[in-house]
Amino acid sequence: MGEAVKVRDAATVMLVREGAQGLEVLLMRRHSGHAFMADRWVFPGGRVDGHDADEALKQALSPGFEPTEGLAEDENTARALYVAALREVFEETGMMLATLADTADNNTNLAAIFQAEPERWQRWRQKLDAGSVSMGVFLNALQEAAGRPVRLDAAGLHYYARWITPTFENRRYDTRFFVARAPAGQTVQVDARELVDSRWLRPAEAIKAYREGEILLAPPTLCVLEDLQRFEAPGDLARLFADIEKTSIDPVLPQLLEDAAGGGEAVLVLPGDAAYREERVDVEVARCPPGHTLRERSGVTRVVRRDGQWWTERG
C-alpha cells in the first residue's frame, strides 16, 4: 500500500455582488497547464502557506473578529485560513478585502490607491504568490500608501462549506469555502498565471454554461452553485448571509462508488447517501467527531458523471 497523501488546509472565496437580475458570483478559469483542476472554472483561493500563520498577523485582522466555530481545531489554524483566503483573493483577482482606519468608504479609497500605482501593486501580487514576502510585509506597504492603519476584513468572510478531496486523488485539500461581498469600486484583474479568465455569473447562468459546454466545473463547485440558486433573486443577498449564520457546516469527503451500475459512469457518494460509509471517514482528516452524522448543506447525496458531465442527485 502506498503512502497516504497529505491533506493540506486550503481556503476559497465566493465573491458575490448584486447584479441587474440578482446575485452574481465570480468564477475564474484555471490555466490549462495546471496539474490540478486544469481549465476548471473555480472560485479564487488556494492552500494555506507558512506565512499565513504568522503571529504578527493576529493584529492585522479587523477589530472584533472571532473565528467561526467549527472552522478548525484551533484558533491559529482558523486565523491562517482567513489570512490565506484574503491573500488568495488579492493575488488572483487584484481586489482587496480590507478596512482603513477612520475611513467611511474603504472600497473607494483602496480602489484609488491601487489605480494610482497599478504596476506597483501588481508586483506585490506576484511576490505574495511566489511566497517571497508575507502578508504582514505587504500590509505595511499598503498602510504606508494609505497613510493610516489597514486591517484585513476577516469579519467580511462568512464560512459556507467544507470539502475534502477524495482519498483516490494524488493531491488532497481540506478546503473551507467562504462567501464575501465583492468590494465596490475595485475591479477584477486576473493574474494570468494561475487564472486566465473571469466571469460574473448568476448561479443558474453558470450551471447553464456548464451544461452547454462553455465552461468546466468540478463537483464541489457545481454543488455550491446549485445551492446558491436559492438566493439569486433580486435583493436576496441579505437573505443569503442570514442563512449562512444559522447553518452548521459539516466536512464533505466524497467517496467513489466502485460497484456503481450504469456502465462506465463515475459515481461520487456524499454524506446522506445510503451507500456512504461514514466508518471510512478519517476522523483525523475530516476532524469530525465519531458518531456525528455528516451532511452536505444543499442536500446533494451523490454526484454522477454521465457523458462527460457531472450531475447531482438527492436521495
Image: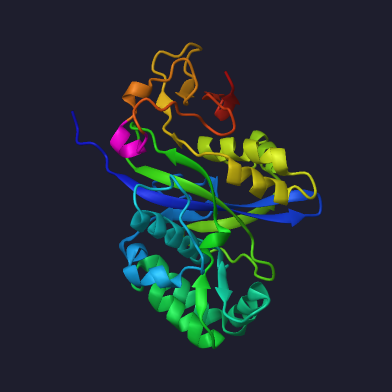
**Near-viewer residue (30 or 54):** 54
Q: Position of residue 11 (x, y in %)?
A: 45, 52
Is residue 163 positioned above or below 124 on the image?
Answer: above
Q: Position of residue 52 (x, y in %)?
A: 37, 63
Q: Position of residue 295 (x, y in %)?
A: 50, 29
Give residue 155's quadrant in the image.
Answer: bottom right
Q: In this rendering, does residue 215 appear at all?
A: no
**Near-viewer residue (221 or 283):** 283
Is residue 305 positioned above or below 145 on the image?
Answer: above
Horizontal side of residue 310 vs 171, given as left or right: right
Q: In this rendering, does residue 75 appear at all?
A: yes
Is residue 1 positioned above or below 13 on the image?
Answer: above
**Near-viewer residue (211 or 205):** 205
Horizontal side of residue 308 vs 141, given as left or right: right
Q: Which residue lies at the image location 52% right of the left edge and 32% below the top edge?
A: 296
Q: Position of residue 174 (x, y in %)?
A: 39, 44
Q: Which residue lies at the image location 47% right of the left edge and 23% below the top edge?
A: 269
Q: Which residues are magenta?
A: 282-288
